[in-house]
Amino acid sequence: MDTTTVTGSGIFAIIPFLIMLAFAALGITCMILFIRVAVRALKALDIYLAEKSRRM
């Protein structure tokens, strides 16, 4: 077996793993951003409801 073939196939085996790792990192980042937005939305809703209940 030629060493260039082994090295070349090793590089091509790593590329899908790196792509999968990048997608996993992107998914975790999106999940963290969604949670942060949801927390802000809940705080805004609490403030809005508190103001509406005081006016009545």
Image (spheres, rainbow, N blue to C red):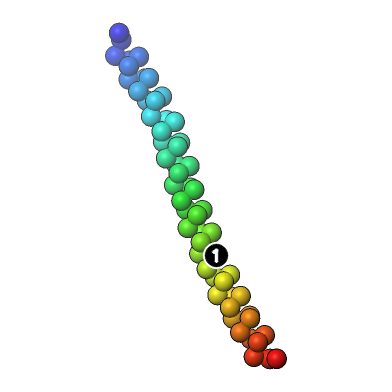
Above or below: residue 31 compared with residue 46 = above
- Inspect the image, locate mark 1, and give the three-letter code of the amino acid beneath it: Val
Look at the image and tell me in which quarter the C terminus lies: bottom right
| Residue shown at the point (29%, 14%) measured from the top left | 3
| Residue shown at the point (45%, 37%) measured from the top left | 20
Q: 33 left or right of 17?
A: right
Residue 37 location, x and y as percent? Answer: 55, 64
Q: Residue 28 versus residue 6: which sits nearer the camera?
A: 28
Above or below: residue 48 compared with residue 31 = below
Q: 39 left or right of 51?
A: left
Residue 26 location, x and y as percent? Answer: 48, 47
Residue 31 location, x and y as percent? Answer: 50, 54
| Residue shown at the point (35%, 23%) measured from the top left | 10
Image quadrant of residue 47?
Answer: bottom right
Look at the image and tell me in which quarter the N terminus lies: top left
Above or below: residue 46 compared with residue 14 = below
Q: Which residue is mark 1?
A: 37
Using a 10 Å C-alpha cutoff, classify the residue at mark 1 as few (fewer than 14 neighbours), some (14 to 19) or many (20 or more).
Answer: few
Which residue of the protein is positioned furthest toward the right in this rendering?
Answer: 56
Which residue of the protein is positioned furthest toward the bottom in this rendering?
Answer: 55
Image quadrant of residue 43?
Answer: bottom right
Q: Residue 49 versus residue 4: which sits nearer the camera?
A: 49
Which residue of the protein is positioned furthest toward the top in this rendering?
Answer: 1
Q: 11 left or right of 49?
A: left
